[in-house]
Image: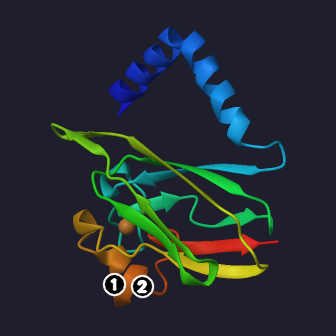
Amino acid sequence: MGEIVRRRDVLAMAAGGLGAALLAGTANRVRAADQSLTMYVFRGVQGILGPDGKGHDAIVPANFVVKVGVPVHLEIINYDEGAHTITCKDLGLNIQIKGGKEVGKTVEPVTTRASFTASKKGTFRWYCALACDAGGHGWAMEQGYAGIGKEGYMAGFIVVM
Ligand SMILES: [Cu+2]
């Protein structure tokens, strides 16, 4: 992973001018009042351990807060080779997160962008609707989709205020 990050840093520096141009392009679509959140998907080997002492797939942060009626722009960077979802029927969400790119024994992260606007206040549970966490023997998915008690891994809460 260190190698990938270093390469990305170098690329970012090399593309400084281009990056600024791309950001300017993005700014046209993201209004000042909008919310932005960067999330990460990590695979079990990255060391987020469950109570069983084993690593498990996790979406970080699993719990987050958004404002009602204000668009939220998510940037989800997936360091796991598998695809995942952020599914929350109460908020009409079923965000499909693209899998990372396997290169030998490492994974190059792949970024998914998605936007939504929460239309009602409350606390809503999301879960990943795909059978993932194979490396952790599916622990995060036990008792159904990201089973009860597995929040912080492939489930969590969206607090809409
Ligand atoms: Cu998942």
Does residue 143 sit above or below 140 in this rendering? Answer: below
Residue 44: image x %, image y %?
Answer: 33, 58
Residue 99: image x %, image y %?
Answer: 32, 52
In this rendering, does residue 153 appear at all?
no
- Which image quadrant: the N terminus? top left
Does residue 96 sit above or below 121 in this rendering? Answer: above
Q: Residue at x 65, y 80 (%)?
A: 124
Crowding around mark 1 (Cα neighbors within 10 Å: few <14, some 14 to 19, many 20+) is some
Ligand 1: give its quadrant: bottom left
| In the foreground, 116 or 140 | 116
- Which image quadrant: the C terminus? bottom right
Q: Residue at x 43, y 58 (%)?
A: 48
In this rendering, does residue 96 appear at all?
yes
Q: Disc 1, disc 2: CB below 8 Å? A: yes
Residue 46: image x %, image y %?
Answer: 36, 49
| In the foreground, 25 or 98 | 25
- Res. 147 mark: 2
Q: Secondary structure at mark 2?
A: helix
Identify residue type, mark 2: Gly
Q: Residue furthest bottom?
A: 143
Q: Residue at x 79, y 60 (%)?
A: 70
Q: Is residue 32 left or right of residue 86?
A: right
